């Protein structure tokens, strides 16, 4: 029964992950401009009249509302749109990804300059990468821990949790010992481990008894800030830190877009005296950069799943982001290498501040939610 439940749970996780991939592609498609894309003519039209607004057509698209003069009314057309939303982006994705990886600043500059039809827009790329990243997490079973030994856990509850874990470990050793032959050399070591576990359990049970006599089980740290909502939120973190961490992970997923407005003032500070760069330019830079880092994190996660050595993954995680950021700054803002490197160093400090602010906002939302 437990195995069947586990299999069902894994299957549901993969279905949810597939749903996240589809949703990411469709959301990216929804914000992706159609300029420059080709449209098939195999559909149903209505002569020279736009079926959406009734304007007389003078080309394949309505010059008033932009709708195609040929509309599809077949089940195959729905599948076609789904495939475009998830993977194709009308071929833009495969032109965008190489530049995002090796020429991020060139991509940023060209998009700002007006080459919009050739590339996936920054927001569409951001949505696609974020949804894909969390879909990969679900597929690989990466999530917050469900049982935590926290400093915020009440003493009695912490002792009981330790007793449970120690008992489970001891029972596993006992079961292994029962399966060993009488002359097996591992018996002595297992017997010592079992004896140590019994001693530890005796100590923990004594501690639990003392706590039950000396302190009320429900007594623990209670916040008194004068703000009822904040006090209640802190109490929730204390009672179930694992659940609150899960909510924090979900909030990172839902509110990841906050990284864009949080980053804009800091990037602006790097170029505030250069009037040729507008906030829009910085927004494109930030959004493409976050999308690139999300895709890098996906690659590292997948590499870890196939047992790539940790040293290689650590090098990628610590070397690639600053190098990529430096290249993007140099290319996007047409800087000299020295200037790009100095700005990268400053921006890395800014990123630490941005990440701290982002996590504080999410924690506050979790406490007040």
Image (cartoon, rainbow, N blue to C red):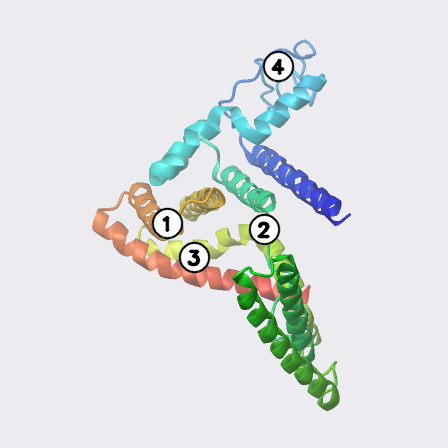
Q: Where does label 4 land, which residue?
A: 57
Q: Is residue 299 above or below residue 59?
A: below
Disc 3 secondary structure class: helix
Q: CA distance from mark 4 to mark 2?
A: 43 Å
How far is the residue under mark 2 from the one under mark 1? 20 Å
- Considering only vertical position in the picture, is 118 above or below 252? above
Sequence order check, earlier mark of 3 and 1: 3
Task: Identify the disc placed on residue 253.
Answer: 2
Q: For mark 3, what is the residue?
A: 265
Q: Position of residue 205 (x, y in %)?
A: 69, 80
Residue shown at 48% from the left, 57% from the top: 262
Specify the farthest residue to the right: 1
Q: Earlier in the sequence, mark 4 or mark 1?
A: 4
| 214 shown above or below 132 | below
> Mark 4 and mark 1: span between their CA atoms?
49 Å
Residue 343 at what x, y percent from top left? Answer: 30, 55
Q: CA distance from mark 3 to mark 2?
A: 22 Å
Percent coordinates x, y for residue 138 in the rendering: 60, 45
Mark 1 lies on residue: 321
């Amino acid at each position: 029964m437990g195995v069947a439940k586990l299999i069902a749970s894994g299957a549901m996780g993969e279905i949810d992950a597939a749903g996240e991939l589809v949703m990411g592609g469709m959301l990216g498609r929804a914000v992706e401009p159609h300029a420059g894309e080709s449209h098939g003519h195999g559909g149903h039209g209505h002569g020279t009249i736009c079926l959406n607004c009734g304007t007389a057509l003078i080309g394949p698209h309505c010059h008033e509302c932009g709708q195609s003069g040929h509309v599809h009314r077949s089940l195959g057309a729905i599948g076609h749109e789904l495939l475009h939303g998830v993977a194709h982006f009308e071929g833009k994705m495969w032109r965008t990804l190489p530049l995002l990886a090796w020429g991020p600043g060139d991509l940023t500059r060209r998009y700002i300059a007006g080459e919009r039809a050739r590339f996936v827009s920054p927001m569409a790329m951001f949505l696609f990468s974020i949804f894909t990243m969390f879909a990969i997490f679900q597929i690989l079973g990466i999530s917050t821990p469900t049982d935590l030994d926290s400093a915020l856990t009440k003493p009695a509850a912490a002792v009981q949790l330790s007793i449970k874990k120690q008992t489970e470990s001891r029972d596993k050793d006992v079961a292994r010992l029962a399966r060993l032959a009488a002359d097996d050399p591992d018996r002595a070591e297992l017997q010592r481990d079992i004896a140590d576990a019994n001693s530890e359990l005796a100590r923990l049970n004594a501690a639990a008894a003392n706590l039950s006599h000396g302190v009320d089980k429900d007594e623990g740290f209670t916040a008194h800030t004068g703000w009822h909502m904040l006090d209640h939120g802190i109490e929730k973190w204390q009672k179930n830190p694992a659940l609150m961490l899960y909510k924090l992970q979900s909030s990172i997923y839902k509110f990841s877009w906050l990284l864009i407005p949080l980053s804009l003032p800091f990037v602006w500070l790097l170029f505030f005296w250069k009037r040729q760069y507008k906030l829009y330019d910085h927004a494109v830079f930030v959004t493409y950069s976050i999308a690139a880092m999300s895709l890098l994190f996906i690659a590292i996660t997948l590499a870890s799943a196939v047992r790539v050595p940790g040293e290689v993954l650590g090098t990628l995680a610590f070397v690639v982001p600053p190098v990529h950021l430096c290249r993007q700054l140099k290319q996007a803002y047409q800087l000299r290498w020295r200037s790009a490197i100095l700005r990268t160093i400053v921006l890395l400090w800014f990123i630490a501040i941005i990440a701290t602010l982002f996590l504080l906002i999410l924690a506050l939302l979790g406490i007040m939610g």
